[in-house]
Amino acid sequence: METYFPTPILDEESSGLLKMISEHGGYAYVSMLAQAAAGDTRAAEAAREMAWEQLHSGPWHSVLPVWRDAFSMACLHVARHHCRDGEFKEALRVLDMGVIMGGPLLRKDLDSAIETVSFRARIREGEKNGEPAGASSENGRRLVSEEEFDKAELLRILPNRSLSCKIVVKRSGLSLEGFLREYFLSGSPVIITDCMAHWPARTKWNDIDYLKRVAGDRTVPVEVGKNYLCPEWKQELIPFSQFLERIRLTGNSSDVLTYLAQHPLFDQINELRKDICIPDYCFAGGGELRSLNAWFGPVGTVTPLHHDPHHNILAQVVGKKYIRLYPASLLEELYPYTETMLCNSSQVDLDHIDDSQFPKVSDLDFFDCILNEGEMIYIPPKWWHYVRSLSISLSVSFWWGSDAGGSTSS
């Protein structure tokens, strides 16, 4: 059977991995894998299903790492069978599932396979459309049109007292030394207005056709529902092209929101990673980058009031967001949840504050701002922040510094 893409790590580690899987009771999986390697498509699918069941046998933290690697292994075999049948889009979907749900052992093989299969898929698509692979349209469809917001209308949808307290200061031409001295060391937020003009993402990501071409067939995890604190909130895995259509068509308050939130998209889709740059500010204090995440969604997405342990720069690539910040010192006044999983989130819904239950909130001072396209905001560690998208919004967050555990942001 033709390999279609090289898997040097799988070739080297396969026997050892299969032995570990057998030691953990995966005899049927090992049998199916042997048949899959000999060209049996059904056996490859069966092996992947067995590993998938193990991934869902209990809480994620209790899943044995060997089964995550087993899932990656099965995905590579299934993808080869799809390539053999010319089903490149389906092969990409399977490989993405291996990246999202699988273990680290075979990650480089998965990434290499995705690069190879993506190229073949684009050639196939180009042949269908009479275009060469990688061709780009000069006049792509815009995801977000430039528009001015009426302040009175804006205030009707924002939390009470918005844009009436302390506005986050804006700086242009802010040197790394100035950032360190005036904001980083003092733990003060700041908006930096002119640090992203050279990013290819500033133009490319507002082009629907570009986004669909480089990422449309890729599978991504999305959040569905108002926000992560709501009982109806859930997660789905969908093609990126379907996600783009959902956010483009969402516009009414009754629409169910779909949000690609806090996902390491740039580890998954290298073409999009090439469109952005790590700001020099992220090396302030001698720290190192801890997390690089995408926050893509429609108008109306809300991240509830919460705080994070790291230094954070949120870069607004496309669209606009409203951001409200409360100093880290205001802990008891913002009523954090007592549950461990939500202890960094406030019980207060800023859009509907219950003064009888949370009497300290309404009179608290805060900072807020409209974060415009092409601007980035520095949010110090432990500062509380609430974020609302005022349009379709594509943002990138850079966390750096502390070793403390992660949570939700932006």
Image (spheres, helix red, strand yellow):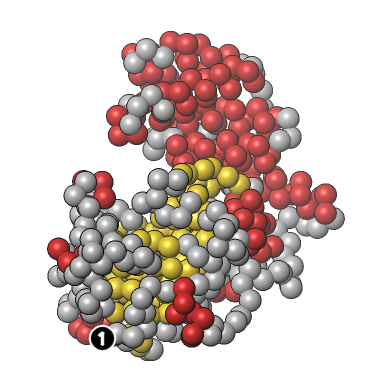
**Image position, residue 84 (x, y; %):** 70, 29
Query: How many numbered badges does the structure rendering display?
Result: 1
Q: In the visual, does 199 lie left or right of 314?
A: right
Q: In the visual, does 3 lie left or right of 152?
A: right
Q: In the visual, does 74 lie left or right of 386?
A: right
**Residue under label 1:** 178
**Image position, residue 266 (x, y; %):** 47, 56
Q: Quadrant of the C terminus?
A: bottom left
**Image position, residue 117 (x, y; %):** 64, 42
Q: Quadrant of the N terminus?
A: top right
Residue drawn at 41 percent across, 28 percent down: 55
Q: Residues within 10 Å of mark 1 (few under 14, many from 20)?
A: few
Return the residue nearer the eye: 86 or 407. Answer: 407
**Image position, residue 399 (x, y; %):** 31, 62
Q: In the visual, does 96 lie left or right of 41?
A: left
Residue drawn at 53 percent across, 85 percent down: 150
Residue drawn at 43 percent across, 62 percent down: 302
Q: Quadrant of residue 129?
A: bottom right
Return the residue nearer the eye: 55 or 68. Answer: 55
Return the residue nearer the eye: 380 or 82. Answer: 380
356 shown above or below 236:
below
Q: Kindly tell me whether residue 191 is visible in this rendering.
A: no
Which amino acid lies under the numbered mark 1 shown in the image of this protein? Gly
Q: Kindly tell me whether residue 359 is visible in this rendering.
A: yes
258 shown above or below 310:
above
- Find the residue positioned furthest to the right: 130
Secondary structure under badge 1? helix
362 shown above or below 242:
below
375 shown above or below 265:
below
- Find the residue positioned furthest to the front: 356
Q: Quadrant of residue 378?
A: bottom left
